[in-house]
Image (tube, rainbow, N blue to C red):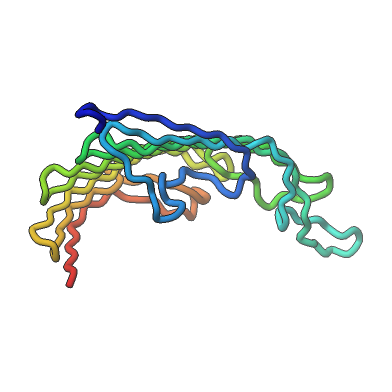
Amino acid sequence: MTNGKPVSSFSMGISSVSRTGSGIRDPGSEGSSRPRVRPFRSIASSRVNSPLRVRLSASSVAPVPSTGVFVIANGREGETYGAELWGDFELTDSWRLKAGYAILHEDLRFAPGSIATSEANDATHRFLLRSSMDLTPKFELDWTLSYVSALPDPTVPAYTAVDLRLGWKPSKQLEVSLIGQNLLDKRHPEFGPANIRSEIERSVLVKAACRF
């Protein structure tokens, strides 16, 4: 607060990085010293993946002529493009939001003569919105909305998921939570071939934690 008025600020940065994985990072997960912000203050950042030429090991199988032998070889190359955005917002003393979005494009190819054993199978779009609210000194309400676009090979359909948690702290030592997971669907797959993959089911559970 400045002279009794809310403080509002915004910061943003862009950097070029190599791709080490896909998915939305939990904002503030890189280290435990997450900035503490006042009401109406927001912190945001972005990351852009430059076009990269990559070679991936153990990604193809090449036959050795006239031997009937197959050798695992480094026979795939291509480019990846991507960007990642995330924000951490404290709207009031009791309400916090985290949001993230990632986009990834992959153009990978196998060398002539190699036999493909796997292709890039990453989602092009990922989105996350997480809310944490202190309803009272003893009750908390948290929810998470996430979206993942379809996977190409093996095909996995896009899905949207909502998780919900209502927490009650009757004392400093005891915490009781009512948790609902995957509330929008009875079940949905997240990866793997259709004939063998498992699916994430809707679930509701009660959790109690006692600290001494």
Left or right: residue 65 versus residue 183 is right
Q: Residue furthest left?
A: 170
Q: In the image, is residue 20 above or below residue 16?
A: below
The x, y position of residue 182, in whole percent, is: 30, 45
The x, y position of residue 165, in whole percent, is: 22, 48
> Looking at the image, can residue 149 be seen?
no
Q: Residue furthest front?
A: 3
The x, y position of residue 205, in whole percent, is: 20, 56
The x, y position of residue 76, in whole percent, is: 75, 47
> Looking at the image, can residue 163 be seen?
yes
Comparing 35 with 21, the one in front is 35
Q: In the image, is residue 11 above or below residue 172?
A: above
Left or right: residue 159 versus residue 110 is left
Q: Quadrant of residue 135?
A: top left
Instruction: Name which residue lies at 11% across and 51% down.
Output: 138
Comparing 14 with 149, the one in front is 14
Say which quadrant the N terminus sits in. Answer: top left
Say which quadrant the C terminus sits in. Answer: bottom left
Q: In the image, is residue 69 above or below residue 30?
A: below
Q: Residue furthest bottom?
A: 212
Q: Quadrant of residue 87?
A: top left
